[in-house]
Image (cartoon, coloured by chain):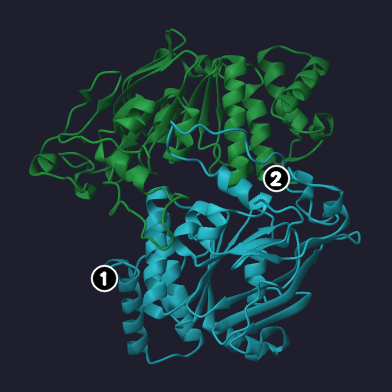
Amino acid sequence: MAGSGTAHMRNNDEVVLEVRDLVVEFKIGRGLVVNAVSKVSFDVCRGETLAIVGESGCGKTTLGKAVLQLPPPKSGDVVFEGTNLTKLPKEQLRSARTAMQMVFQDPISSLDPRMTVKALVEEPLWIWERGTEEERGAKVRELLNNVGLDPDLVLNRRSYEFSGGQCQRISIARSLALEPRMLICDEPVSALDVSIQAQILNLLQDMKDRYGLTMIFISHDLAVVKAVSNRIMVMYLGKVCEVGSPDAIYSKPAHHYTSALINSVPIPDPTRKRGAVPLQGEPPSPVAPPSGCRFRTRCPAATELCAAEEPQLREVNPGQYVACHHPRT
Amino acid sequence: MSAILSIRKLVVNFETPRGLLSAVRDVSLEIEQGSSVGIVGESGSGKTVMSRAAMGLLSGSTVRREGTVMFDDKELTAMRADEVRDQFGTGMAMIFQDPMTALNPVRRIGSQLSEGPRVRLGMDKKAARARSIELLSLVRIPDPEAMLNKFPFQLSGGMRQRVMIAIALACKPKLLFADEPTTALDVTVQAQILQLLSDLRREMNMSMVLVTHDLGVVANHTDFVAVMYAGEIVEQAPTTELFSNMKMPYTEALLKSIPKIDSASGARMAVIEGRLPDPTDRPSGCGFAARCSYVQDKCRTEHPPLVDAGNGHLYRCWYPLGHTIGRK
């Protein structure tokens, strides 16, 4: 990939979020610029879960935050339910953003340790002056019940009294307080034990069904997203590599990077021996990304063409798009 | 083969305001010379406390430790603190979970790397520098000379973990403890680091203890696995035996909860409901009874002993699994 292109965009009535040619850059002094997200386009349909997958530093978290205009992108459009968020004045943006909420990676540090659970979950309702005190109290109890916590036991305790998995449940209750239509989950389970991961993934699925949510699920672990997503977008160094359904991506990944990611997942079976480590080295610096395809420096199939010309996303199988000059077949 | 580390009836309790917290309960484990042993369990299962106690790293007035630990035919548990410290580096070394905080942020990589060779092996500055460069190439860091002058904050997580491994290996330890060495890393980097550890272990004929919560990680990188739950070893066996002939319902539940890339998309994940029992108030029966899907009355009242199933396979269950899973 490391390509741009919009071949994978769907233009139908079901599209809730449309992101076009989004660019996010960070100035780091001495005239240097980190190219965190470079011309990325994608869309999400109502009720769908889009998974954004890639290694640390590929821009997936920045992309998730840029959708919420945190910080506002350098260029590109983010259209949510027909409203272009990049063009909104500050107050209208704040108001529009109540429909989109985020669940963060580290459940313990993302909750204020001095606030009680009741205050944490109720805070969004205070800020937006929703309901009376009684109605808010009832809402908090309902939310805590829905995420599997007993309100009577947890309401007056503080976040440090809970385990990571329980804190993530509190974060999820808090993010649902304003009844958002879209939830952006940034590595919601990567700080948790495997046994707790499964509980939280199931909870997110339940919440999605109960509240009719559209979800963006950001993760570095392809095995985790398999269960929860309808569509997967693989990113590398600020660009899109591949977009497709989970079944297509896992059974016949077209991009060499996707294939390497899949082969990196440890298999809990000692009789299935691994071959060579699928990917050597680390991603190059986003300050000076390689020319052409950004993955070419680690790609087994790279040729001169890959250095000269940036591949564009194109359809290789129905519904599966890849940005690669030499896709796997 | 002889055991490099032999843990016998190890008990670790902490005194807390709420009473005695039992972190490790009667753990016995032998680590054979040159082998790689995985210790698996959830957070709070006692795996980290057990490995630290085995290294003699737990001290303080609130720690109550019983049992014996023999390392390289010497009784660690009978040694004074400074004598235990003399074993570090050349005898045993540890890689910690979080490479971001385990390195000293205000010292250059070169100075942190050369400390071991200078103090333990008595090398002069020049020799220690040469050794540092050799170590950085050993852990496949490109341009090792330039690396010596860098600070930890200039490195990525994967690079920092390589530096941590280089520091641990600096004095050629006989036994390496790796406590969740890849949990903070990406899957791609995890695959690289695990492969690196396996290769180095073979090259240096070193024994390794790999502490992790992920059965997927131990499957391909260990010879023997001990599964811990609520401070006890609940099942232990050679790795292939464990996966083909699992006896303990907890091990099975742990295996099933791992997200797999060949699972159906949209399928619900298998979970282990509930949590570990309170370590200050251990249940009288089996610790896993409250969460076990095969639980019987006996499990709630009587504590199961370790049963020997042959082939080095021990388990702690009244009603062990009769079927084989894990093979596809």
Q: Is residue B118 left or right of residue B263?
A: right
| Residue at left offset 29%, top offset 47% | B276
Residue at position x 70%, y 41% in the image: B105
- In which quarter of the view is residue A137 placed? bottom left
What SS does tag 1 mark?
helix
Give the spatial CA distance, label 2 vs label 1: 44 Å
Q: Is residue A174 left or right of residue A77?
A: left
Q: Which residue lies under the disc numbered 2?
A: B156
Judged by depth in the image, the label closer to the viewer, 2 or 1, is 2
Q: Is residue A259 above or below residue B236?
A: below
Query: Which colour denotes chain A?
Result: cyan
Residue A311, percent across and down?
78, 61
Q: Residues within 10 Å of mark 2 (few under 14, many from 20)?
A: some
Quadrant the N terminus of chain A occupies = bottom right
Q: Name the residue beneath numbered marker 1.
A: A152
**Residue type highlighted by circle 1:** Asp
**Horizontally, is A216 left or right of A176 in the view?**
right
Tell me the residue at 75%/13% (across/down): B123
Percent position of residue A254, x then y: 64, 55
Horizontally, is B206 left or right of B68 in the view? right
Q: Position of residue A295 (x, y in %)?
A: 75, 51
Q: Provide residue A186's location: percent of width, then percent of height.
A: 55, 63
